[in-house]
Image (cartoon, grey):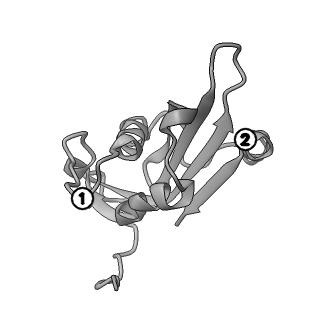
């Protein structure tokens, strides 16, 4: 049985040398293009430094057995981490499918593209469309 041994430190917005991931969302949307048989996986992170997005196409034959378990691998990144950990050099030897980590690292690199407090109505509209189209949704916080 695995347990969390420490409570994450609170986010400190003043520390520009670190990022605090507050929320990770994974939207799994069926790909409807004529040639595609699979899913568009969109990952959104919310941090003290802004929002970051990434996406990845996964063919139907290569999809994970369980989207929730697959996405839950990212729970370890919630809380304060030094920016140096947010590189694509991170490697988990226990995990053979590292696509979820690639999605996360791409989003972390793009974290400053959106403001930390986006227009609430735009945010809700975008999230509503994604949730409406998604066949799976995972929110980690």
Residue sitting at 73 percent across and 39 percent down? Answer: 126
Tag 1 residue: 94
Q: Position of residue 117 (x, y in %)?
A: 60, 49
Tag 2 residue: 130
In front here: 66 or 141? Answer: 66
Decide if residue 115 is in sight here.
no
Decide if residue 3 is in sight here.
yes
Q: Position of residue 128 (x, y in %)?
A: 79, 45
The quarter of the picture where the N terminus appears is: bottom left
Q: Residues within 10 Å of mark 1 (few under 14, many from 20)?
A: few
How far is disc 1 from disc 2 in space, using C-alphas? 31 Å
Q: Position of residue 137 (x, y in %)?
A: 65, 53
Q: Residues within 10 Å of mark 2 (few under 14, many from 20)?
A: some
Question: Mark 1: which secondary structure?
Answer: loop
In front here: 131 or 108? Answer: 131
Picture quadrant where residue 20 is located = bottom left
- For marks 1 and 2, the one nearer the N-term is 1
Q: In the figure, 133 relative to 5: above or below? A: above
Question: Mark 2: which secondary structure?
Answer: helix
Please indicate whether residue 112 sits to the left or right of residue 33 in the image. left
Q: In the figure, 89 relative to 37: above or below? A: below
Picture quadrant where residue 97 is located = top left
Q: Residue furthest top?
A: 34
Residue sitting at 71 percent across and 46 percent down? Answer: 135
Please indicate whether residue 111 sits to the left or right of residue 114 in the image. left
């Amino acid at each position: 049985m695995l347990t969390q041994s420490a409570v994450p430190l609170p986010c400190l917005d003043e520390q520009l040398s670190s990022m605090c991931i507050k929320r990770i969302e994974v939207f799994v949307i069926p790909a409807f293009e004529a040639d595609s048989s699979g899913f568009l996986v969109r990952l959104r992170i919310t941090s003290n430094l802004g929002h970051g997005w990434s996406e990845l196409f996964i063919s139907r034959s290569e999809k994970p057995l369980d989207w929730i378990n697959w996405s839950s691998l990212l729970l370890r990144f919630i809380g304060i981490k030094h920016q140096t950990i947010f590189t694509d050099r991170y490697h988990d030897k226990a995990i053979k499918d590292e696509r979820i980590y690639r999605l996360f690292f791409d989003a972390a690199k793009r974290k400053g593209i959106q403001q930390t407090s986006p227009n609430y109505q735009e945010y809700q509209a975008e999230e509503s469309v994604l949730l409406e189209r998604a066949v799976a949704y995972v929110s980690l916080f």
